[in-house]
């Protein structure tokens, strides 16, 4: 492969890994995702895991949390999508910090990347933070066990 081909592949690889969630420019006026955690980091297919997003918001009016997910198996991207994550708005009213937690389950083995973001009532979008989980195939000979 020549150097032009290698450069094109490098650009393609970087582009494929770029999150599609658009963040507003940094400012003290927008919400901020301060942490993203997935637990456990390794699960069997069909077993639940939790994604937890900690955020701060100077206006105390975050209304949306979302995650862009990408499913990879080795070096190949299989699928991707966008999901909403629950926010208990009543519990967060007037609070400048909060957490959104969701239980997720996936069926196909591989690595799943989650790029997460929150948005406030005025449409100001936070930064984007990433986390991942590895899903292993559930052995067919075993009864499903998520313990």
Image (tube, rainbow, N blue to C red):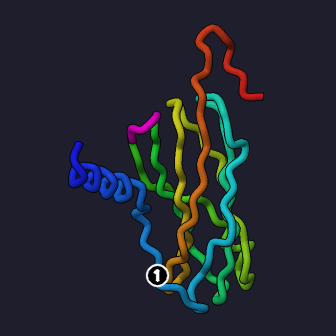
**Which percent across, then down, holds residue 68?**
47, 56
Q: Most extreme residue toward the top, as rendered?
A: 141
- Residue reaching furthest right? 147
The residue pinned by badge 1 equals: 24
Is residue 12 placed above or below 141 in the rendered structure?
Answer: below
Q: Residue at x 60, y 28 (%)?
A: 136
Residue 122, magenta (yes or no): no
Quarter assignment of residue 126: bottom right
Residue at screen point 38% across, 57% down: 14
Quadrant (top left/top right/bottom left/bottom right) for the N terminus: top left
Image position, residue 18 (x, y; %): 41, 61
Q: Residue at x 30, y 54 (%)?
A: 12
Would residue 99 be found to the left or right of residue 112 on screen? Answer: right
> Vertically, is 147 above or below 115?
above
Q: Nearer the viewer, residue 60 or 52?
A: 52
Task: Provide the residue span drawn in magenta.
Answer: 73-77
Magenta segment, principal secondary structure? strand
78 or 90, which is in the foreground?
Answer: 78
Against 35, residue 29 (above or below) is below
Q: What is the quadrant of the C terminus in the image?
A: top right
Residue 99, percent from left and from top:
71, 66
């Amino acid at each position: 492969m020549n150097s032009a081909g290698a450069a094109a592949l490098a650009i393609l690889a970087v582009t494929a890994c770029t999150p599609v969630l658009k963040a507003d420019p940094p400012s003290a006026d927008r919400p901020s995702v301060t942490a993203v955690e997935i637990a456990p980091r390794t699960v069997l297919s069909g077993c639940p895991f939790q994604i937890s997003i900690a955020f701060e918001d100077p206006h105390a009016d975050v209304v949306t949390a979302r995650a862009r997910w990408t499913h990879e198996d080795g070096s190949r991207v299989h699928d991707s999508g966008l999901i909403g994550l629950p926010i208990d708005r009543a519990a967060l009213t007037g609070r400048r910090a909060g957490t959104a937690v969701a239980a997720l389950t996936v069926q196909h083995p591989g690595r799943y990347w989650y790029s997460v973001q929150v948005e406030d009532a005025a449409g100001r979008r936070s930064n984007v933070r990433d986390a991942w989980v590895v899903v292993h195939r559930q052995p067919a000979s075993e009864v499903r066990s998520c313990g």
